[in-house]
Image (spheres, grey):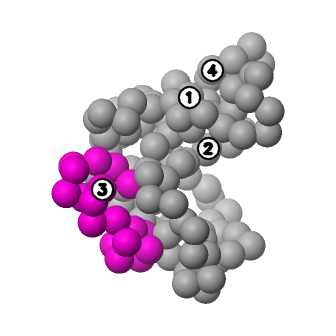
Amino acid sequence: MQHGLCIYNKDGFSFTKDDDFEKLDVLFRQHFPNVYAFFDEHSDKVKKAGLSNWLVCTKASGHGQGVVVFSDDTRFPTGDDIVTASQVGKARTNFNEGVLFLGTITPLSCLSTLD
C-alpha cells in the first residue's frame, strides 16, 4: 500500500479451487486498480501473446528473501493455483492466514506513474 497499488479491504480476499482466471482477474482488478491501469496501458505484448499479466508466486526455501513463480506460465492461473501455492512447504500455513504473492510479467518499473 506504500505506492497506492492496492485498495484496503478489511474483509480481504476469498478464493476457491474452482475459481477460474476470469473471476480472479475481475477480483484483482477491483483490489489493484492502479496496477491494472498500468497493465491496460503498458502490456500490449502480453495481451497479444494471450498470456496473463500476473502469475501466482510462492516463498520457497533456499531462495532467500525472494519468491518463485508457482503457476504455469503457459496457461492462465486459477484458484487451484492460489490454494495449492498457499499449502506448499513444511509449515503448511492455514490458508486463511496465508500471504498471496503475485508476480507480473510486465515490470512495474514506473511506480511514480501510478500515484
In the image, residue 60 lies at what x, y percent?
Answer: 69, 26
Q: Does the segment drawn in magenta span residue 81?
A: no
Q: Residue 46 — which label?
A: 3
Q: Give the label, 4 or 3, closer to the camera.
A: 3
Q: Marks 1/3: CA distance?
A: 23 Å
User: SS of the residue at dot 4?
Assistant: loop
Quadrant where the N terminus is found in the figure: bottom right
Q: Marks 1/4: CA distance?
A: 5 Å
- Specify start and end residues of the magenta stretch as a single range: 36-53
Query: Disc 1 marks which residue?
Result: 85
In the image, residue 66 lies at what x, y percent?
Answer: 72, 40
Disc 1, disc 3: CB below 8 Å?
no
User: SS of the residue at dot 1?
Assistant: helix
Disc 3, disc 2: CB below 8 Å?
no
In the image, residue 45 lies at what x, y percent?
Answer: 27, 60
**Badge 3 amino acid:** Val
Can you tell which quarter of the image residue 48 is in? Answer: bottom left
Going 46% across and 43% down the picture, which residue do you hit? Answer: 55
Query: Disc 4 marks which residue?
Result: 88
Can you tell which quarter of the image residue 115 is in? Answer: bottom right
Disc 4 packing (10 Å; few <14; some 14–19; many ≥20): some
Mark positioned earlier in the residue sequence (1 or 3): 3
